[in-house]
Image: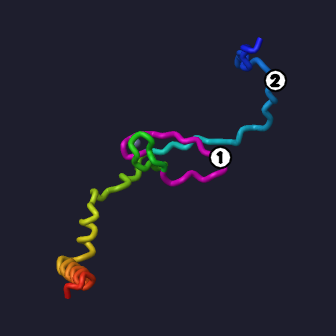
Amino acid sequence: MASGSAIRGVRIGSGPMRPIERGEPAPRRSVTYWCAGGHANPILLAADVPPPATWDCPRCGQPGGLDAANPPGPARPEPYKSHLAYVKERRSEADGEAILAEALAALRRRRGEV
Ligand SMILES: [Zn+2]
């Protein structure tokens, strides 16, 4: 019969013997991080690495710390600023006028207007 399926029904637990797992799993420990939103997030870490100082909360995204009574503040305390707002912090209005005049002069030179 050519129509026989090559894949036979296989149940979990049937089939060839699996190799016996050897060795102990790496030792781990649970470290709990607390965020400003009051979430407690236990994280499993390898026992031989020092826990990082902060761990972002998977529920609200704020950084969590190891001290439940004193969680770190929100990641971005500053309100969002536009690109233009940052430029205006660095440059004064007069700077802007000078840069604009310079750019216009260069443009006119290139066009052969001057
Ligand atoms: Zn949180």
Q: How is the image coloured?
A: rainbow
* Residue tagged 2: 17
Q: Hey, what amino acid is under mark 1?
A: Ala
Identified at 21% across, 80% down, the residue is 104
Q: Nearer the viewer, residue 27 or 59?
A: 59
Where is residue 29 drawn, in percent x and y? 62, 42
Circles 2 and 1 in contact, beta carbons < 8 Å: no
Q: Residue furthest bottom?
A: 114
Viewer can see residue 23: yes
Q: Which residue is mark 1?
A: 47
Task: Assess disc 2: are there few (<14), some (14-19) or many (≥20) residues with their C-alpha within 10 Å of its C-alpha.
Answer: few
Q: Nearer the viewer, residue 21 or 32?
A: 21
Query: At label 2, which amino acid type do we have?
Result: Met
Q: Is residue 41 magenta?
A: yes
Q: Is residue 67 left or right of residue 74?
A: right
Image quadrant holding the N terminus, namely: top right
Q: Give the answer, above or below, for where 64 lies relative to 91.
A: above
**Residue range highlighted in magenta:** 35-54
Give the residue drawn at x 30%, y 59%: 78
Q: Magenta span: helix, strand or loop, mainly?
A: loop
Q: Is residue 40 above or below residue 102?
A: above
**Spatial CA span between label 2 and label 1:** 32 Å
Q: Secondary structure at mark 1?
A: loop
